[in-house]
Image: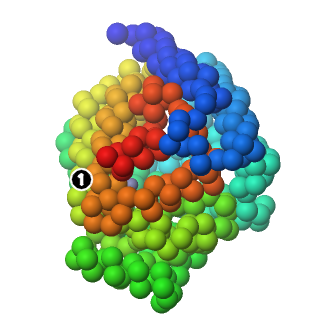
């Protein structure tokens, strides 16, 4: 195969992926105005339903603009040998291969983030604002960006350095060392994310003693679950949308509730949401997901190790001096169909897990408060109640509200 053929394969993959996405988005958009099924009539009133349809349509149009823009940007960058230009720039600053790679990715990431900045600004301060979700101030927005870059440089740069270093030190077997490093990092992050990363962006306070805490403790006791770390996070700093999640395992396991969730839901509904989260833990979904993602990373690193030393990868992107970092980009583009498929598999699994967690909440607590909680959460985020099945199959990590209600009532 020639570098030229590989170049056209990459272009074709980018375009096919874009087209599939747009077709499924369009199918989904056709159903924005569907009549609501009986079970969902009480989610929205007439006015709010109209509003949710406008929200979906606005985001759909915005999505077409941003994804077309980024496709054209990527194609333009490839066509104009952008990678060669950035690579030469990095090489003009240093001779150290690790520093070259760090500079290269730094320029690419920062550049693309700055170019797409107007879109994220518009999404937050125009679209989310117009529909009453936005609570982010310009100051928070700017600080979030800066902290995000800082984190990216520290964590992304650190991991990249370790991987490049293991490639230089061990050659073709580098994937084993890189895999061990990434696995350790993933487990570490899973355990300490809430302690180390979240505080940079949000305030977390332990849930205060009171009637809600009593109800939660009473439930936790019935299922023999040690639930002593419940934190309330100031999600209202950025958005009115609400959420709850479980993180860590062993002694580090904790539940995080958005303050917006506590404001929107009744105590019983919050306990039901927690029961669902406990279900994820008890059914070992958290550990399973962790190991599945580590396994998939291993497979990917192994395949990467088979191709990375082939200069064809770099040449396909128009870069004359073959290197690990350019090969990595070409590989990522070529690997995208495989990662799409594994992503679909993970989504399917995640939807099955959601049913299991719902069933756990139903049998150990109650179904009805969970149903009303899910309805309120859907209403408050103006979510789409009638998504197209193909869209659900591709993108949903959770079953639809209707599917979950039906399952909870059987
Ligand atoms: Zn869940």
Q: Nearer the viewer, residue 378 or 309?
A: 378
What is the basis of the colouring in this image? rainbow
Residue in the picture at 24% in, 73% down: 223
Residue in the picture at 58% in, 76% down: 203
Q: Nearer the viewer, residue 306 or 47?
A: 47
Give x and y (percent) for residue 99: 48, 50
Q: Nearer the viewer, residue 333 or 28?
A: 28
Give x and y (percent) for residue 198: 51, 69
36 vs 13, left or right, is right
In the rendered image, which residue does mark 1 sit on? 288
Instruction: Determine the quadrant in which ligand 1 lies.
Output: bottom left
Q: Tell whether circle 1 marks a residue whose Cβ is less than 8 angstroms from ligand 1.
A: no
Is 103 situated above or below 10?
Answer: below
42 vs 280, left or right, is right
Q: Residue furthest front?
A: 38
Residue in the picture at 50% in, 58% down: 372
């Amino acid at each position: 195969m020639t570098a030229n053929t590989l170049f056209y394969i990459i272009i074709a993959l980018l375009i096919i992926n874009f087209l599939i996405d747009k077709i499924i988005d369009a199918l989904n958009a056709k159903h924005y105005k569907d009549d609501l099924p009986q079970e969902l009539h009480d989610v929205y009133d007439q006015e709010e339903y109209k509003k949710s349809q406008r929200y979906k349509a606005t985001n759909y149009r915005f999505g077409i603009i941003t994804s077309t823009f980024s496709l054209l940007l990527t194609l333009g960058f490839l066509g104009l040998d952008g990678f060669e230009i950035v690579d030469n720039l990095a090489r003009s600053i240093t001779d150290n291969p690790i520093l070259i790679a760090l500079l290269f990715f730094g320029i690419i990431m920062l550049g693309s983030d700055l170019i797409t900045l107007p879109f994220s600004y518009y999404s937050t301060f125009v679209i989310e604002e117009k529909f009453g979700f936005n609570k982010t101030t310009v100051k928070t927005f700017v600080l979030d960006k800066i902290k995000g870059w800082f984190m990216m440089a520290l964590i992304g740069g650190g991991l990249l350095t370790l991987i490049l270093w293991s490639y230089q030190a061990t050659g073709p077997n580098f994937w084993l060392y890189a895999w061990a490093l990434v696995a350790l990092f993933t487990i570490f992050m899973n355990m300490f994310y809430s302690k180390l990363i979240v505080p940079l962006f949000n305030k977390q306070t332990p849930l205060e003693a009171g009637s809600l805490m009593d109800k939660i403790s009473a439930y936790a006791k019935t299922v023999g679950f040690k639930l002593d770390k419940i934190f309330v996070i100031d999600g209202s700093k950025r958005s009115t949308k609400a959420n709850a999640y479980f993180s860590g395992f062993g002694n580090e396991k904790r539940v995080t509730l958005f303050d917006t969730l506590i404001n929107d839901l009744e105590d019983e509904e919050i306990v039901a949401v927690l029961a669902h989260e406990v279900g994820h833990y008890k059914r070992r979904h958290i550990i399973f997901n962790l190991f599945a993602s580590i396994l998939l990373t291993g497979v990917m690193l192994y395949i990467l190790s088979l191709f990375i030393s082939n200069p064809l990868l770099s040449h396909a992107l128009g870069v004359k001096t073959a290197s690990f970092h350019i090969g990595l980009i070409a590989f990522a583009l070529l690997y995208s169909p495989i990662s799409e498929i594994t992503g679909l598999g993970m989504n399917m699994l995640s939807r099955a897990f959601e049913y299991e967690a719902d069933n756990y909440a139903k049998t150990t607590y109650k179904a009805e408060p969970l149903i009303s909680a899910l309805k309120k959460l859907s209403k408050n985020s103006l979510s789409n109640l009638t998504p197209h099945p193909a869209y659900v199959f591709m993108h949903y990590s959770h079953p639809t509200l209707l599917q979950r209600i039906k399952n909870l009532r059987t």
